Image (tube, rainbow, N blue to C red):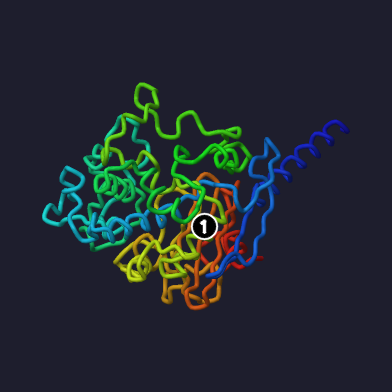
């Protein structure tokens, strides 16, 4: 009987350990800031568990959908330069006709793409386009389109919008998306970050935060202190020759929807840029009107006018999660039935964006009225518990409030 008892105790101990792991992140980082700088930081855990490397606020992580907000800032810079028009048909820049199959008369614009009102869905895919592939092939699939709603009439969060935004940006500027974002946003702000690693320097890549599943197995960026051999989806023959790039052909290549590697301190600079109406530490990146265009909701939930969650299986989004949206900017704490978009629980209408992918949960939120903000992320949490008072997870509620 004793061996059986020992076996049972061993199984129970393993189960308890797995349960604890499932409830606790591998790493957690939270940075509070105001218009002048960082006011508080809390870090715990490991950036790389195999190397036993501790996490810091300066370690770059794949920040998931907060990437969309940063991409939108880059797009608005091109709008200010006169290279893009928020309300022009994007077909001219794409070089092919982008139309909903059932609504051929309705142009699709950059504003519709940035605000998830283009009638696109993720049902046909959005990121697994090979280096030698074309984004257009996804758009030719009928599953890529919402068959029930015309462009401009319905909010449906879809990652596919942002590879199209990146394609339009490439065609407008004649530059590869990752390099373009470095020139437009990251380098002017002094942020050591990049989309899909290629544009990061070796020192930044060496500090990569590894993302983990619930069993603590690496999912992304387990790069052993260097850049990955291939930072993009390789070509169909397996090669990774980036000279294959052609402007606007494959806007998914550098993951504009979720592939930004940025640190918590870098996120704080993005937040401070928004708090400063387009200026931070003496650097003016956007005009105040452009910031207002980004953050002003163009969609507010009402029954029948959109979906309040993301359909992609991120493990985070639930009904009531998104109820107000601008151009790649969420507004929290929407009053009204069906909205549960307040992880802070205080009713303040903060703006920013959430992120969730590969076991990471993240958020960047600012309160323009008080001039304060917070950026946070946790890793190793693909099955995070549901929140107590919102559609966010419990750990996001805790991180938002600094608990």
Residue 319 vs residue 151: left or right?
Answer: right
Q: Quadrant of residue 11?
A: top right
Residue at disc 1, secondary structure: helix
Q: Nearer the viewer, residue 249 or 303?
A: 249
Q: Residue at x 34, y 41 (%)?
A: 252
Is residue 297 shown left or right of residue 119? right
Between 54 and 192, the residue placed more toward the observer is 192
Residue closest to the far right: 2
276 lies left or right of 249: right
Q: Quadrant of residue 321?
A: bottom left
Q: Residue furthest left?
A: 105
The residue labelled by disc 1 is 267
User: Residue 124, percent across and down?
Assistant: 31, 41
Residue 155 x/y as whole percent = 31, 61
State the image coordinates of residue 323 (x, y, percent, origin top left).
40, 67
Task: Tell me which residue sits at (16%, 43%) in the image.
Answer: 96
In this rendering, is residue 293 above or below 240? below
- Is residue 251 visible to the viewer in this orientation of the structure? yes
> Where does residue 316 sit, x and y in percent of width and height?
50, 54
Task: Give the answer, above or below, for where 326 lies relative to 47.
Answer: below
Badge 1, how many Cα within 10 Å: few under 14, some, many 20+?
A: many
Residue in the foreground of this view, choosing between 176 and 208 = 176
Check the image and report above or below for 373 versus 257.
Answer: below
Q: Is residue 391 left or right of residue 54?
A: left
Q: Please tell me which residue is depicted at 61% across the width and 36% down the height of the picture.
A: 217
């Amino acid at each position: 009987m004793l061996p059986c008892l020992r076996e049972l105790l061993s199984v129970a101990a393993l189960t308890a350990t797995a349960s604890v792991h499932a409830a606790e992140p591998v790493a957690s980082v939270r940075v509070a800031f105001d218009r002048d700088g960082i006011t508080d930081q809390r870090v715990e855990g490991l950036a790389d568990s195999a190397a036993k490397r501790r996490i810091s606020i300066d370690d770059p992580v794949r920040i998931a959908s907060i990437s969309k907000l940063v991409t939108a800032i880059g797009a608005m810079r091109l709008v200010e330069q006169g290279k893009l028009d928020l309300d022009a048909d994007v077909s001219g820049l794409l070089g092919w006709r982008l139309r909903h199959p059932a609504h051929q008369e309705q142009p699709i614009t950059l504003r519709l793409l940035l605000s998830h009102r283009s009638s696109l869905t993720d049902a046909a895919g959005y990121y697994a386009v090979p280096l030698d592939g074309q984004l257009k092939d996804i758009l030719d699939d009928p599953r890529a389109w919402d068959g029930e709603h015309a462009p401009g009439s319905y909010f449906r969060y879809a990652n596919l919008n942002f590879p199209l935004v990146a394609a339009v940006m490439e065609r407008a500027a004649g530059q590869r998306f990752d390099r373009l974002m470095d020139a437009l946003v990251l380098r002017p702000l002094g942020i050591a970050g990049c989309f899909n690693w290629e544009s990061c320097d070796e020192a930044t890549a060496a500090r990569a935060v590894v993302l983990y599943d619930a069993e603590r197995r690496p999912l992304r960026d387990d790069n052993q202190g260097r850049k990955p051999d291939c930072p993009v989806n390789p070509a169909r023959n397996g090669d990774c020759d980036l000279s294959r790039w052609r402007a606007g052909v494959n806007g998914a290549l550098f993951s504009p929807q979720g592939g930004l590697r940025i640190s918590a301190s870098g996120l704080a600079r993005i937040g401070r840029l928004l708090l400063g109406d387009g200026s931070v530490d003496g650097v003016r990146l956007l005009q105040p009107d452009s910031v207002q265009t980004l953050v002003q909701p163009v969609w507010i939930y009402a029954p029948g006018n959109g979906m309040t969650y993301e359909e992609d299986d991120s493990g985070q989004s639930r009904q009531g999660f998104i109820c107000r949206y601008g151009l790649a900017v969420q507004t929290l704490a929407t009053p009204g039935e069906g909205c549960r978009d307040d992880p802070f629980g205080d009713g303040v209408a903060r703006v920013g964006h959430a992120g969730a992918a590969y076991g990471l949960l993240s958020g960047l939120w600012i309160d323009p009225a008080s001039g304060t903000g917070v950026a946070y992320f946790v890793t190793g949490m693909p099955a995070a518990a549901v929140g107590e008072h919102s559609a966010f997870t419990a750990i996001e509620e805790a991180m938002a409030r600094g608990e």
